[in-house]
Image: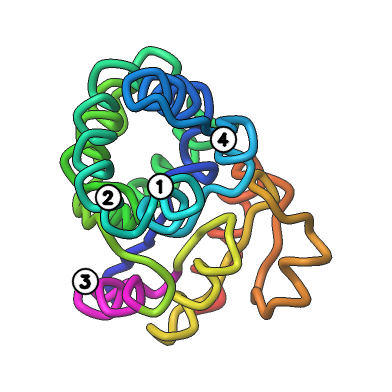
Amino acid sequence: MSLTVGFDLDMTLLDTRPGIRATYDALAAETGTAIDSGLAVSRLGPPLVHELANWFPAERVAAVADRYRELYVRHAMSGTLVLPGAREAVAAVRALGGRVAVITGKFERNARLQLDHVGLVPDVLVGDLWAETKGDALREHGAAVYVGDHLGDIVGARAAGAVAVAVATGPYGTEELRAAGADVVLDDLTQFPDWLAGYRSAA
């Protein structure tokens, strides 16, 4: 049976916090609105509009989100860091003849630019999804496993009937991820190739 593994993007494959913080700072300067960019990047995962609603009135959020996405292209790419084990995790899927699907809450065009910037090219990329809606894309692309750092990623995996693999590289520790229902909890992606090999041999 062919294997498709889904990955979240922010704080799963990539540490995008430096660039996101720079983008929020640029947005704050341009709009004259105080934004605690450090706080914002500490809670990555939910859709952008959820975070912006903490800083802007509801009637401005959609327009400000569009401007944030424009600023993101200018400010966010150079600060992107590939998280430990990310390249090896992708390679491990491909070594088994599998496909890599990145299913993310990030605006899809910017997610593509960010992945291209660091040289990680998935077979499938779907953006603008969160929690249960990630499950829709996972089912559509036949993902048996979904790897993420957020409780919402566990929800997405469950919604798709996929194995929920959680990595403690985002806002939650191993015990919180386990308590939220993750099937597998790893410290980071450096542990993923060995887990995948065991999972595949048992399938």
Q: Amino acid at mark 2?
A: Arg
- Closer to us: 201 or 133: 133
Mark earlier in primary sequence (2, 4)? 2
The furthest residue to the right: 175
Q: Amino acid at mark 3?
A: His
Q: CA distance from mark 3 to mark 4?
A: 24 Å
The spot of residue 111 in percent (x, y) is: 27, 40
Nearest to the eye among marks 3 and 1: give it.
1
Mark earlier in primary sequence (3, 4)? 4
Q: Amino acid at mark 4?
A: Gly
**Side of 30 where 123 appears, left or right:** left
The residue beneath circle 4 is 85
Q: Amino acid at mark 1?
A: Phe
Q: CA distance from mark 2 to mark 4?
A: 39 Å
Q: Identify whether 182 is placed above or below 59.
A: below
Mark earlier in primary sequence (2, 3)? 2
Classed neighbour count for the residue bearing mark 3: other residues with Cα under 10 Å, few (<14), some (14–19), many (≥20): some
- Closer to us: 167 or 75: 75
Secondary structure found at label 4 = loop
Q: CA distance from mark 1 to mark 4?
A: 37 Å
Mark earlier in primary sequence (1, 4)? 1
**Side of 90 where 106 appears, left or right:** left
The residue beneath circle 1 is 56
Classed neighbour count for the residue bearing mark 4: other residues with Cα under 10 Å, few (<14), some (14–19), many (≥20): some
**What number is the disc on residue 141?**
3
Q: CA distance from mark 3 to mark 1?
A: 36 Å
Secondary structure found at label 1 = loop
The residue beneath circle 2 is 60
**What's drawn in magenta, residue-wise?**
133-145
Classed neighbour count for the residue bearing mark 1: other residues with Cα under 10 Å, few (<14), some (14–19), many (≥20): some
Write down the quadrant of residue 75 in the picture. top left
